């Protein structure tokens, strides 16, 4: 795994993508949470200038350098009011002002000071309360919880915010209908599960390109399949051939020599690794879904695999498959049960995907809990398991970013 500062052992850093109007990733919200605390607040006045903050910021910077996306982070009143040095370049972060912020003259002055130093602020969970208008000149983004504050009721107020030149972020966008509404009202950024939960048409026919992808994946499930058969299947798809050779020639794949043919690639990689890469490429090639969804599913698959490896389980490759295929309905807009029937998954993998049952289901359950910031499931876990999950998810984030860059 990638090495992170040791302070991250004690802080859960759940991430949620923030997307732009074309569903590309604009940045990530990092939600800090102590390993043994029910409260997400990890800062206080006494620790604001401590090595904890410095180490945490180093961790943020390490992530940003590899993901190359800004992070949205919560900063408490104590830290904003302190004279602490925040050792992160302003370009890398947006600082969120929480909705329960006590508005004092001292806070507004501190906000102005941080803003003059180049830091950008997000007003979180804005409910069009007049008391918070005093902060609007100093913030760059206004975040609106569209479940709690339905945008249809505030069309004029939303228009007024746009006139001010503020960027609007719709939070808790749960479906594509809300995404389209917010987009039409002028929202610029979006956060929620609408990408993973598309409107699926029951009984939708699987088109020929997807069927071809499924046939290849199924063929690769056969452990006795010949090198010649695999080579032929891959070679018949020019895009797949190009992308596979490109991945194999990249540093992240770990092949010790330059690969010049599909047959050589098959021999060097072996069936298990080839199956994984072919599945990734097929998923990315056979769908018009945004890249952000592929990153979510890759992160999910890799996190499941790392959790299995941490247990020294022999099911680590199956765990990867389970994590990746858990969102296949969102990729193809086809009911999960229908598309899983077409894929030659074993009974345990299928049960893990459908009901989170068994060992594989446990890895998927932990990963989904982290992805969705479901603290009710995470908090009861032993500290050692939380640390493993935390690092597995962060490593998976960075790995998925590398993969997507390699296959595009």
Image: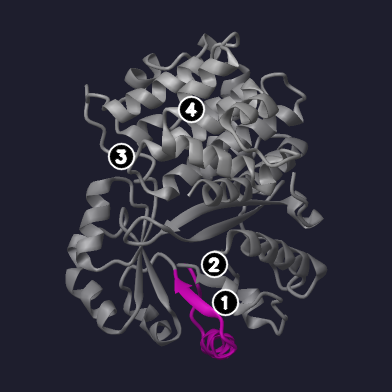
**Residue at x 52%, y 59% (from the top left corner):** 29
Q: Mark 3 or mark 1: name the one nearer the start of the chain.
A: 1
**Which residue bears the numbered disc 3?**
198
From the image, state whether disc 4 or disc 1 is nearer to you.
4
Which comes sooner in the sequence, label 4 or label 1? 1
Q: Answer with mark 1 or mark 2, whichever residue precedes in sequence.
A: 2
Identify the residue at horizontal 57%, vertical 40% (top origin).
245
Is residue 338 found left or right of 283 in the rendered image? left
Q: Earlier in the sequence, mark 3 or mark 4?
A: 3
Task: Tell me the distance, in whole angstroms, between the alpha carbons under discs 3 and 4.
Answer: 30 Å
Q: CA distance from mark 3 to mark 1?
A: 33 Å
Q: Determine crowd level at label 4: few under 14, some 14-19, many 20+ residues with C-alpha closer than 10 A.
A: some
Closest to the camera, between mark 3 and mark 4, is: 4
- Residue 318 image position (x, y, % from top left): 60, 22
Q: Which residue is mark 4?
A: 234
**Mark 1, residue position:** 91
- Where residue 281 appears, x then y in whole percent? 48, 36
Identify residue for label 2.
Answer: 70
Which of marks 2 and 3 precedes in the sequence?
2
Q: Which residues are magenta?
A: 100-123
């Amino acid at each position: 795994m990638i090495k992170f500062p040791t302070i991250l052992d004690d802080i859960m850093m759940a991430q949620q993508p923030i997307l732009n109007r074309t569903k590309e990733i604009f940045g990530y919200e990092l939600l800090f949470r102590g390993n043994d605390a029910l409260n997400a607040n990890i800062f206080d006045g006494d620790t604001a200038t401590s090595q904890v903050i410095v180490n945490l910021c180093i961790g943020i910077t390490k992530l940003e350098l590899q993901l190359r996306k800004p992070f949205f982070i919560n900063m408490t009143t104590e830290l904003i009011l302190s004279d602490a040095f925040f050792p992160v370049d302003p370009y890398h972060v947006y600082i969120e002002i929480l909705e329960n912020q006590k508005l004092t003259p001292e806070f507004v002055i501190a906000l102005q000071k941080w803003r003059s130093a180049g830091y950008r602020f997000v007003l979180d969970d804005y409910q069009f309360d007049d008391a918070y208008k005093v902060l609007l000149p100093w913030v760059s983004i206004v975040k609106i919880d569209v479940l709690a504050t339905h945008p249809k009721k505030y069309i004029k107020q939303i228009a007024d915010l746009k006139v001010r030149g503020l960027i609007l972020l719709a939070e808790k966008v749960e479906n594509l209908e809300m995404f389209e509404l917010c987009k039409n009202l002028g929202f610029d950024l979006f956060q929620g599960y609408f990408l993973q939960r598309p409107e699926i048409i029951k009984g939708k026919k699987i088109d020929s390109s997807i069927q071809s992808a499924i046939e290849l994946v199924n063929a690769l499930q056969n452990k006795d399949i010949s090198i010649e058969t695999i080579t032929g299947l891959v070679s018949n798809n020019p895009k797949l051939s190009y992308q596979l050779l490109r991945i194999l020639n990249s540093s992240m794949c770990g092949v010790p020599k330059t690969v010049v043919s599909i047959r050589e690639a098959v021999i060097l990689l072996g069936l298990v690794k080839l199956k994984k890469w072919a599945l990734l490429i097929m998923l990315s090639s056979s769908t018009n879904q945004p890249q952000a969804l592929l990153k979510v599913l890759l992160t999910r698959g890799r996190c499941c695999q790392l959790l299995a490896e941490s247990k020294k389980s022999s099911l680590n490759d199956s765990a990867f498959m389970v994590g990746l295929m858990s969102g296949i309905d969102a990729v193809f807009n086809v009911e999960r049960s229908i598309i899983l029937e077409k894929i030659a998954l074993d009974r345990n993998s299928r049960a893990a995907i459908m009901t989170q049952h068994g060992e594989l289901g446990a890895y998927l359950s932990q990963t989904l809990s982290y992805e969705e910031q479901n603290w009710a499931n995470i908090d009861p876990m032993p500290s050692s398991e939380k640390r493993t999950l935390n690092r597995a998810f962060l490593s998976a984030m960075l790995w998925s970013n590398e993969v997507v860059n390699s296959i595009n």
